[in-house]
């Protein structure tokens, strides 16, 4: 399986976060003025959107139930690298950014803008920490994983794909689309079985959740695990698979989402000044080293 995957590997986006431009078009910040919106949109040029489309074409074709099972056995051994979160942040920041350097912030800046916006609103410290670490699972890219298996909207596999997932037309090329085990409303699942029993398309969300699951409060874990599950937290397309706890915890996922999407500002945060606070915060919840 590995060989065929490597042969197919092709990373269409210049920057792994270009798909987020598309998210901002789909879900614009309701608090922004029209002028700000127009300014922001100016950089979402059509060429970049074409690469995002190409990215989703691959994502929707290759994220099958079997693929997710395969990635779980590969990555949930956590034998790739032992790192502190600081080493993971440095590692993530080595991702080369081919697109516009004036506009794109590095990974550390995105994490800090998210967490600082949460802190400024007076939320509990574990939510600030969640903002700071929520994308560390993107180190998958540095372990050689293709973009379509790291970022992008996530969605359940093993049951029918919702028509409200971005670019739903690309699912026709997914083998599960015509597989009778997987293409009904419930597929391999039971009604309201709980999302913990549902396999999500593989990417940075599930991977980081599995690394952090012993260390953070439950709402933090839901945020990390489902922050890219727009078909649920924005579109409510999978409530039939959720149990009561999921529904309650998704209120936190929804609360977090605007900080992730709308905290991007052109002014980079003052990393040096902020580090002492984050070091203390990380020590409160996390061990010195984590297995990736
Ligand atoms: Fe993310
Ligand atoms: Fe993010």
Image (tube, rainbow, N blue to C red):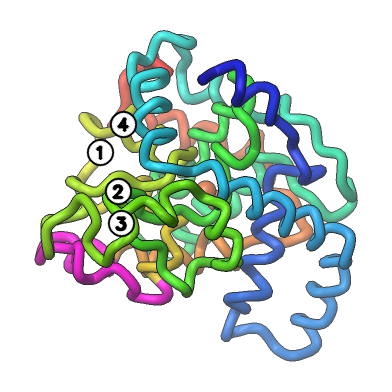
Local crowd at mark 2 within 10 Å, few (<14), some, or many (≥20)? Answer: many
User: Which element type, helix, strand or loop, lies under badge 4?
Assistant: helix
State which mark lies toward you, 4 or 2. 4
Front residue of this view, candidates 199 and 79? 199
Does residue 237 belong to the magenta stretch? yes
**Residue 10 position by quadrant:** top right
Residue denoted by label 1? 216
Whether pointer 1 and pointer 4 mark residues with C-beta atoms closer than 8 Å, the reply is no
Magenta residues span 234-251
Local crowd at mark 4 within 10 Å, few (<14), some, or many (≥20)? Answer: some
Which callout, 4 or 2, points at the residue further toward the start of the chain?
4
Label placed on residue 210: 4
Whether pointer 4 and pointer 3 mark residues with C-beta atoms closer than 8 Å, the reply is no
Which callout, 3 or 1, points at the residue further toward the start of the chain?
3
Does residue 134 belong to the magenta stretch? no
Residue denoted by label 3? 159
Which callout, 1 or 4, points at the residue further toward the start of the chain?
4
Q: Where does residue 237 sit, x and y in percent of width and height?
A: 34, 73
Which callout, 2 or 3, points at the residue further toward the start of the chain?
3
């Amino acid at each position: 399986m590995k060989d065929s995957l490597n042969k197919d590997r092709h990373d269409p986006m210049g920057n792994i976060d270009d798909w987020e431009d598309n998210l901002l078009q789909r879900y614009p910040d309701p608090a922004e003025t029209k002028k700000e919106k127009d300014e922001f949109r100016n950089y979402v040029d059509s060429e970049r959107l074409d690469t995002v489309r190409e990215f989703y074409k691959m994502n929707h074709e290759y994220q099958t139930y079997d693929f997710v099972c395969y990635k779980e056995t590969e990555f949930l051994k956590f034998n790739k690298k032992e790192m502190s979160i600081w080493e993971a942040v440095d590692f993530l920041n080595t991702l080369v950014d081919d697109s516009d350097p004036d506009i794109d912030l590095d990974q550390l800046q995105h994490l800090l803008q998210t967490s600082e916006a949460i802190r400024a609103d007076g939320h509990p410290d574990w939510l600030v920490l969640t903002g700071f670490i929520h994308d560390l699972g993107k180190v998958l890219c540095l372990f050689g994983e293709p973009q379509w298996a790291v970022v992008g909207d996530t969605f359940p596999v093993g049951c029918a794909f919702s028509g409200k997932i971005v670019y739903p037309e690309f699912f026709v090329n997914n083998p599960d689309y015509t597989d009778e085990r997987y293409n009904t409303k419930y597929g391999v699942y039971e009604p309201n079985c709980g999302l913990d029993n549902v396999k999500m398309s593989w990417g940075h969300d599930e991977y980081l959740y599995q690394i952090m699951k012993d260390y953070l409060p439950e709402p933090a874990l839901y945020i990390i695990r489902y922050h890219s599950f727009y078909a649920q937290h924005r579109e409510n397309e999978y409530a039939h698979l959720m149990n009561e706890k999921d529904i309650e915890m998704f209120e936190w996922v929804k609360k977090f989402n605007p900080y992730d999407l709308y905290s991007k500002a052109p002014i980079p945060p003052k990393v040096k000044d902020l580090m002492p606070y984050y070091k203390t915060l990380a020590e409160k919840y996390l061990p010195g080293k984590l297995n990736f």
